[in-house]
Image (cartoon, rainbow, N blue to C red):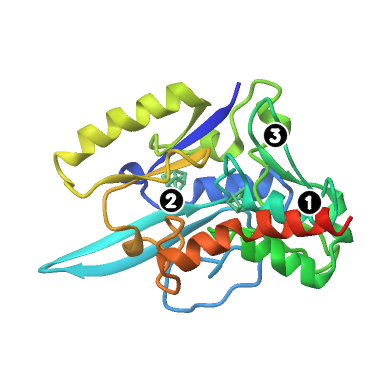
Amino acid sequence: MAKTFLIDTSRCTACRGCQIACKEWNELPANDTRQWGSHQNPPDLNAYNYKLVRFNERRDGDTVRWNFFPDQCRHCIDPPCKHEADAYVEGAVIQDPETGAVLFTEKTRQLSEEACEAVREACPYNIPRRHPVTGALVKCTMCHERITRGMLPACVKACPTGAMNFGEREEMLALAEKRLAAVKAEFPNAMLADPDSVSVIYLLTDDPFNYHQNAVAGVTRDLDRQQFLARLTAPLRRSARAAMQG
Ligand code: SF4
Ligand code: SF4
């Protein structure tokens, strides 16, 4: 059965337990860090951080708001990264039909630099990163080896507030609607981020841009809607071209 996360940002305290649990489970080394004026650390996703709690502070009239966004792969239902990768190396990106997890395999090492960039650009959430040593593309795996043995993803298991939720898709969609209705009483602009197209659904209490420029696909500041749709369908067009060229 397809699995889904609900990340309820209204309950996130930015403790970063999920970020660290992800590093521990995947045995990822520490990053060299520096003070860059934010508690967000490291500054961005990288080959050793598949999950990153983003911090964004802003003024709202007389109130200072601090939004927390535990960023990770959305495990798209129809993943553009897979469409793109298929045009270069079949099997570099696969999707588990049971869980819906989108998985980058060892074959991503066979992708040229140009192909890696194309796969990265195909992602509407700017998630994949290239490993500096192995050359593989890496990202969140949905803790596939855990969930297929009946365990929760490490990040969900570690979250102390109920912000991270995981389960059957129908169950998570129902929980998302229930929490959205409850949160709207205090935050009328609350919304679910791209619930129909991803397996990692965020409940946001604020404008997506007040979390992160890639919080929601298709509304990045740099792309208008038409450009975004062109970007989203580019992998499909490239795949068709590759098929025609034999
Ligand atoms: S979020 Fe990006 S990397 Fe993850 S499945 Fe979607 S397109 Fe692929
Ligand atoms: S563990 Fe939960 S509360 Fe802590 S940063 Fe992650 S999502 Fe937020």
Query: Sequence-wise, which precedes: disc 1 or disc 2?
Result: 2
Q: Is mark 2 within 8 Å of ligand 2?
A: yes
Q: Give the percent coordinates (x, y) of residue 229.
A: 50, 59
- The type of residue carrying mark 1 is Asp
Q: Which residue is mark 3?
A: 144
**Secondary structure of residue under mark 1:** helix
Against 119, residue 173 (above or below) is above
Among the two numbered marks 3 and 1 on one chain, the one whose residue lies closer to the N terminus = 1
Residue denoted by label 1 = 86
Q: Residue at x 85, y 54 (%)?
A: 89
Closer mark to the observer between disc 3 and disc 1: 1
Dot 3, how many residues are within 10 Å of its Cα: few (below 14), some (14-19), or many (20+)?
some
Q: CA distance from mark 2 to mark 3?
A: 24 Å
Q: Secondary structure at mark 3?
A: helix
| Apparent side of residue 33 relative to residue 171 in the rendered image (left or right) | right
Q: Is residue 58 above or below residue 138?
A: below
Q: As displayed, is residue 81 above or below residue 102?
A: below
Residue 37 visible in rendering: yes
For badge 3, the amino acid type reads His
Q: Which residue is mark 2?
A: 15
- Amino acid type of the residue that numbered disc 2 sits on in the rendered structure: Cys
Report the Cα–Cα distance between label 1 and label 2: 38 Å
209 or 21: nearer the eye?
209
The secondary element bearing badge 2 is classed as loop
Number of marks in picture = 3
Dot 2, crowdedness within 10 Å: few (<14), some or many (≥20)?
Answer: few
Residue at 42%, 45% (x, y): give it. Answer: 194
